[in-house]
Amino acid sequence: MKIKFNKFSIILLIILMVTAISIGCQPEEEEPEDNDNVDSYDDPETDDDMNEGVDEGMEDNDMTDDTEEDMDGAMNDNSEMIADSIVEMEGINDATVVVRDNTAFVGIDAADTTDGEVSDQMRQDIETKVKEEDENITEVYISAEEDLFDRINEIAQNVRQGDPIEDFGDDLEDLIDRLTPNGAE
């Protein structure tokens, strides 16, 4: 028995097959069990899970404001945690910390500083403490100068109030210039 198909029937059959295949090949979406942990940036194991299925062509500027605020909030919590751990160190009266990417800016009020100078041992101890608290930090800038402590503290307070850390890029670059010895890079 011979069956004749006209062009319209063949095209319709192809469209139906393609549609059925594309619908059938869609991965099943899973609902997150706990929405509070979806935007966690502190746990590297969850970062891989969060990135599954993300369009590889997505660029950084495709992030929503909510995600940027969550990241700033996570950095803010991290900064406060680091500052608290520094204050627990012997000889430190107060500390303020701003974290940007892999860099920490630390302002301290310490009993053992002379003219805002931090001893090499104290500098090394603070740097070790900061890197223990956040293993992603590779650069630590430390100052006991009152004006730099105030600048770092002001930036930290603004970030806590919701200002994005990127708004303080020029201030942070100026801090790096002031805290880097002449000729060092």
Image (cartoon, rainbow, N blue to C red):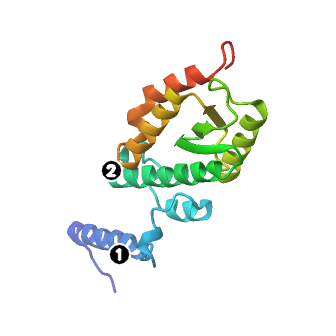
Pick the residue in front: 120 or 33.
Answer: 120
Question: Which residue shows up at 75% across the image and 42% down it?
Answer: 125
Q: Given the current orientation, which residue lies at the most extreme top position?
A: 183
Q: CA distance from mark 1 to mark 2?
A: 37 Å
Q: Quadrant of the N terminus?
A: bottom left
Q: Amino acid at mark 1?
A: Ala
Q: Given the current orientation, which residue lies at the most extreme bottom position?
A: 1
Crowding at label 2, few (<14), some or many (≥20) Cα neighbours within 10 Å?
few
Count of numbered labels shown in the rendering: 2
Residue 65 place in picture, x, y as percent: 32, 50
Closer to the chain start, of discs 1 and 2, is: 1
Q: Quadrant of the C terminus?
A: top right
Which residue is labeled 1 in the image?
A: 20
Which residue is labeled 2 in the image?
A: 65
Q: Given the current orientation, which residue lies at the most extreme front position?
A: 111
Residue 38 showing in the rendered view:
yes
Pick the residue in front: 62 or 121.
Answer: 121
- Residue 55 as seen in the image, left or right of residue 14: right
Q: Amino acid at mark 2?
A: Asp
Crowding at label 1, few (<14), some or many (≥20) Cα neighbours within 10 Å?
few
Residue 176 place in picture, x, y as percent: 56, 25
At mark 2, the secondary structure is helix
User: In the displayed structure, would residue 55 be above or below residue 140?
Assistant: below
Residue 71 place in picture, x, y as percent: 45, 52
At mark 1, the secondary structure is helix
